[in-house]
Amino acid sequence: MLVALGLLTSFLSFLYVIAPSVRKFFAGGVCRSEVQLPGKVVVITGANTGIGKETARELARRGARVYIACRDVLKGESAASEIRADTKNSQVLVRKLDLSDTKSIRAFAESFLAEEKQLHILINNAGVMMCPYSKTADGFETHLGVNHLGHFLLTHLLLELLKESAPARVVNVSSVVHHIGKIRFHDLQGEKHYSRGFAYCHSKLANVLFTRELAKRLRGTGITTYVVHPGIVRSELVRHSSLLCLLWRLFSLFVKTAREGAQTSLHCALAEGLEPLSGKYFSDCKRAWVSPRARNNKMAERLWTVSCELLGIQWE
């Protein structure tokens, strides 16, 4: 018994000693750009919490006028107030945006376009994960509707302003789980078969394919686009899965903070010289490998066409 207790004490002491090194390793890449953003305008979806909030904080610290576009306006105002106090930047604004409702997306875009004459950075950060089967206000499966179609429509509505403000960037937040995602064109809405875990993976693959096709269509416009894996991050995204919530607590040493998770989004929004890599996938602030499906140009083109049809828009 005493031997076992001694071994346990030694093991815990060892963990305590190496913990800082382990945390540093799993923290991942850091955005090294020193670019400042006075006079620049930024929109970040879902920036009332988590990665989006920390992204907004850093861009505000660099002098940008930052719009927090989120569903929960009260939570958004709380985040904005905190960021304004922290950064001494009064230009942190909150606007209502519900990505599960195309009417809300159109209302946000209409209001924003009436308010602003420029948009330099759009960060499509918001998302849902592991939701029980449900549909958006427009009848789309929730992961597809919020994570992909909502941001697809928002980007479409803001695109002309981005072009007028060029050089401009669009950053889409995806995930490494796109590697196990599929675009099931025969059952996009999950009505024949639904797995809330795989539904998230499918939507993250859609993010990568959207970025790939968007980059192709934006060549020569002065707009570049990037898609990122933020890492395994401690955030509210896992709130629908009690198992993931437990695992995140048990293995907190290996899970990124929201600030650490924001670094790759910041890198793709700020780093100089990234233009030749438009359409590429980044992790830990460097280009990363994507799945074979994510490199399928025909699949990207078809998803683009189907997305336009579902949303009732024309985007050539």
Image: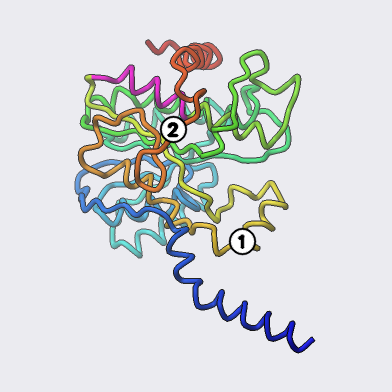
Task: Please identify the quadrant where the C terminus is shown.
Answer: top left
Which label lies toward us, 2 or 1? 1
Instruction: Of the two numbered discs 2 and 1 on the same chain, state the one appearing first in sequence.
Output: 2
Q: Nearer the viewer, residue 80 or 270?
A: 270
Tell me if residue 211 is in the magenta stretch. Answer: yes
Provide the residue span drawn in magenta.
Answer: 208-219
* Residue contact between numbered discs 2 and 1, judged by CB atoms under 8 Å: no
Query: Residue 147 at what x, y percent from top left?
Result: 54, 33
What amino acid is at disc 2? Phe
Q: Nearer the viewer, residue 309 or 290?
A: 290
Q: Return the mark for residue 251.
A: 1
The outermost residue toward the bottom is: 2
Q: Is residue 60 left or right of residue 37?
A: right
Q: Is residue 66 left or right of residue 187?
A: left
Label 2, label 1: how far apart the Cα atoms are: 38 Å
Q: Is residue 105 left or right of residue 92?
A: right
Residue 8's place in the image compared with 259, above or below, is below
Tell me if residue 295 is in the magenta stretch. Answer: no
Task: Please identify the quadrant where the N terminus is shown.
Answer: bottom right
Q: Which residue is mark 2?
A: 108
Residue 97's place in the image compared with 243, above or below, is above
Q: Return the mark for residue 67.
A: none
The outermost residue toward the right is: 1
Residue 110's place in the image compared with 79, above or below, is above
Query: Residue 16 at what x, y percent from top left?
Result: 54, 77
Question: Residue at 41% of width from left, 62% of height from top?
Answer: 82
